[in-house]
Every structure is written in structure tokens, then in C-alpha cells.
Image: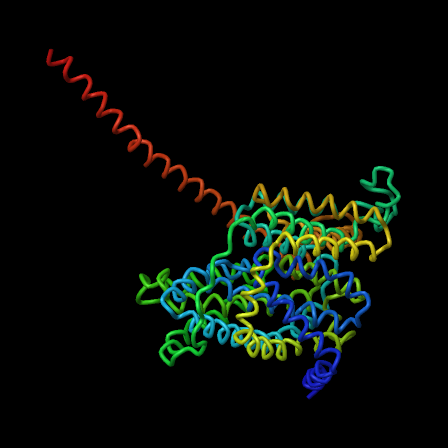
Amino acid sequence: MDFLSPVLAGFGVVFQPDNLFYCLLGVTLGMLVGVLPGLGPAATIAILLPVTYNIEPTSAIIMLAGIFYGAQYGGTITSVLLRLPGEASSVVTAIDGYEMARQGRAGAALGIAAIGSFIGGTISIVALTFVAPLVSGFAVDFGPAEYTMLAVLGLLLVTTIGTSSVAKGLLMALLGLLLATIGQDPLIGTERLTFGSDELLDGIDFVIVAMGLFGVGEILHNLESSRRKVPQPIKVGSVYPSRKDLAESKGAITRGSVSGFLLGILPGGGATISSMVAYAVERRVTKQPERFGKGAIQGVAGPETANNAAATSSFIPLLSLGIPANATMAIMFGALLLQGITPGPLLVDEEPELFWGVVNSMYVGNILLLAMSLPLIGIFVRILRVRAAILAPLTVLITMIGVYTVRNNVFDMFLVIGLGVLGYLMKKVGFEPGPLVLAFVLGGILESAFRRSMRTFDGDLSGFLREPIAATLLGAIVVLVVLSVLRAVRTARKKKSKEIDVTPAEHQPADRDEHRDRDPAEHR
């Protein structure tokens, strides 16, 4: 009964009129962001961070959370109708979803995606309700040594799982750690990397980094890639899947819910990775793999269920440990700090209204999304016709006004522009900003925890081995490093073997031509 009391009180928080309004606003904005290719929930939340200053903390986090999981719904619509993923997590949905649409089954694809998203999200919320307090209770005993190892493990997972290139991910993480050191030393107060600038004495605010890399950087990159013409959407038809569709999707939805929940918890996992894993699993377990890529409904149901389950479960490490699992959660971490709330093991006891209000708002948000996603398809498709040249300047204007209001400092505006250009160039050369932002957030946690650990252990690094939990996490780090090295070696060998296989084929015609030219001379 002690456990149920705060949970039920959380529903009382959600059903307050202002919180219901912000929940509805969040999921609506999320769907809109999901429909518009390129912008993404991370950029939108980053742009809206200054707005949350004037909103009550629980309402602000409810709205931002709604944007995150609402975007997973919206990205499906353009993936199915236009083969134009509005969200990275909807890329694999476009493979079979668009083929279903071409076969006149767009409604069934959108319907099963909405149902799968609702089921996956709801199962994940129920699991979150029970798992998050348990993790918080376990993590209450964490000291500096445990948080040091946890931060290192999080950084490694982000760079090895969450990026296509480990080397690029590590480079971005190192840059993020470097940016986190700018300002005054947190323990002894000496200046670091300020270059004599008084504006940098307090370091770079997280809002500036997030709005620069994700806000301005994404907008610049999208302006360049938005020159392509948006194709005409395919007619939707009936949005209610048949009994056969539901029967075929049942297993995919179940597997997607489980895999999405588990992958969402891992730092570096998240909605995009979970949707790709779910698609690969469905291709492996099906008796008719040849149907995939040609309109298999399991190829829509599995990934869509998984990405919504992962979007919800990624709140567990953030709220329970204070460790963001992905770039969007890193921005949510910043939003909580802006409200004067420190996410971590004590949050569930110190801020029960906020904790359970945010968790329970996801039940309401999922119901709202299921009710709105299908009737509003026509409106969202029309929004795609608004030119990027109109949307981009308005978004940049809102971003710059928001940046100035944070500290009323013009220098911050120049920083955002500089970081925006950096984010654009990173995208151009294939570097993702996610690891940089996560490392920037985790850098402060890592430095403080490590230095406190060293004071406790009198500078002896072997002290980490004497702490059971820290030693276990260190073992996981070693295993992860070994697996990453083995994967890199295996990839290098495969690449080398392919080059060896191609070389004889390239030289063979030339040898034949050489023999052909030589033969007449020999006969003569």
C-alpha cells in the first residue's frame, strides 16, 4: 500500500487542468516534430528549454516528455505515405510501410503502427512504474566510486552502441568532455580554458550547447537537404487493420515491446537502435523472410512497437540514476537542472509529485496519441508542404530570443551561432552530435565523482576494485572494450578479404586480353 499511495497521487497530479493541457500540448508538438523530416525531438526540446523557465517544473517536464515519445508516432506517417522518415527511429518502418501503401494498404500500416506504438509504450510505462523505484532504491547506496564507473560505462556504451563509427563517437565524446572543463575548477576555483574571457568563467551553459548543436545546427543542415521535392502522399483508406493483420502482428508487437524496453534502458540504445534490432529480429524469426521489403506487416509492427517502448524506458536511467541514456535524455537532464531539480536516486523520495506525475502522464499521453494519430493524418501531410525556407528563419529567431533570455547575455548568442556552425559541419562530415552532448553532461558527473573517489582512496586507483559495485561496473567496462576491439578486428578482416576477392576478378580480364594479344605473335 505504501508503494501504491504515491503512484495514485501521481494520477491526481496528472489530472490537474494545467498538467493535462501541457501533456496534450507536448504530444501534439511531438507528433508535429515527428512528421517534419530532420528537426527531431532533441532539437525541439533544446529550442523550448528557455520557455520552461516560466512553467511549473512538473508541467514543464510533462510537456517535454510528451514531445519525445509523441515524435515516435508522428515519424510513422511520412515514412508510410511518402517514404520520408520524419524521425531516425522510423527509417526501417519506411521499408515495408511504404510498400504496403503502394499496395493500397497504407491505412492498415498506419493502424497497426498506432496500435503497436500504444501497446509497446503502455507495457513500457507499466514496467517503468515498477522498475524505476527499485533501481532508485538500489542506487541510493552509490558513492563517488560507483558514479565514476557508471559515467565511464555510459560514455563507452554511447560511443560503441549509439554510433555507426566507434572512432567518430569517441572523438565527439572527447570533445564533449573538453567543453565540460571550460570555466572554473569546481573544487579549487582555478580558471580552465577561459582564454582570459570573463564570460567563460562560469563555463558554457548546457542550454547553449544543446540549442547550438541541435537547434541551429539541425536547421542549417535541413535547409541544405530540403531542396528535394516532397512526393505526393498515397491515399490512406481504412485505418483499421483486419483480423489477419492483427494475428500476424501479435508476435512482432510482443517481441518489440520486450526488446524496446530493454534497449531503451541502455545508454546509447534508444528508439533508433531498438527499431533496427526489432526489424532484424522479425526477419530472423519469420518463416517467410522473402516478404520483408515487399510489404510485410511485421516489418512495421515490430519496429514501431520497439521505438515507443524504448522512448519510455529511457527515462529509467535518467530519473533513477541521473544518467541520460541518449541525446534527448541529456537535454531532459538539462531541463530538470534548470528547474532546480537534480535527477538521481533521491528524486523519487524528494520529488514524488514530479516523479510520479511525469511517469503517469505517459499513460494519458499514449491514449491521446492513439486517439489523435489517425484522424490528424491529413493535416500533418499538408504541413509538409510548408517550405523549409519559411520555417527555418522563424525557428532560428525563436532560438536566438530564447538564448538571450537565459542569462540576458549577447555573448551566449554568438556561442550558439558558433556551436550551430560546428554542428552543421559535423553533420556534413558524418559526425553525430549526440555523443558530444552526452559527454558534456556526463563530464561534470565524471570529474566530480572521480576526484572525490581519489580523495577517499588517497590517490590509489586500486580502491575501485575494493568496492563491489564499482568493481562489477569496471568488469563490464573491460568486457565492452574487448568486444569493441574484437568487432573492429573482425570488420577489418572482412574488408580485407573482400578486397582480396575483388582483386583477381579485376585483373582477370586484363590477363585474358594480354594472352589474346600475345597469341597472334606466337603463331607468327
Q: Residue furthest bottom?
A: 1
Percent of width and height locating residue 432: 60, 48
* x, y percent for residue 479: 54, 52
Evaluate whether residue 254 shows in this view. no
Rendering coords of residue 244 (x, y %): 35, 78
> Where's the C terminus, which quadrant?
top left
Q: How is the image coloured?
A: rainbow
Instruction: From the top left corner, tell me how far across and down residue 165 is, in percent.
Output: 54, 46
Q: Quadrant of residue 150?
A: bottom right
Q: How many marks?
A: 0
Q: Does 227 appear above or below 505?
A: below
Instruction: Name the one closer to the observer, 34 or 389.
Output: 389
**478 and 164: which is toward the camera:** 164
User: Image check: 511 left or right of 408?
Assistant: left
Q: Quadrant of residue 376?
A: bottom right
Q: Residue furthest top?
A: 524
Quadrant location, the N terminus: bottom right
Residue in the foreground of this view, choosing between 343 and 280: 280
Residue 339 horizontal side relative to residue 129, left or right: right
On screen, 509 above or below 199? Answer: above
Residue 365 falls in image quadrant: bottom right
Res. 173 in view: yes
Image point (77%, 74%), residue name: 351
Can you say whether 165 is above or below 277 in the image?
A: above
Q: Residue at x 68, y 43 (%)?
A: 422
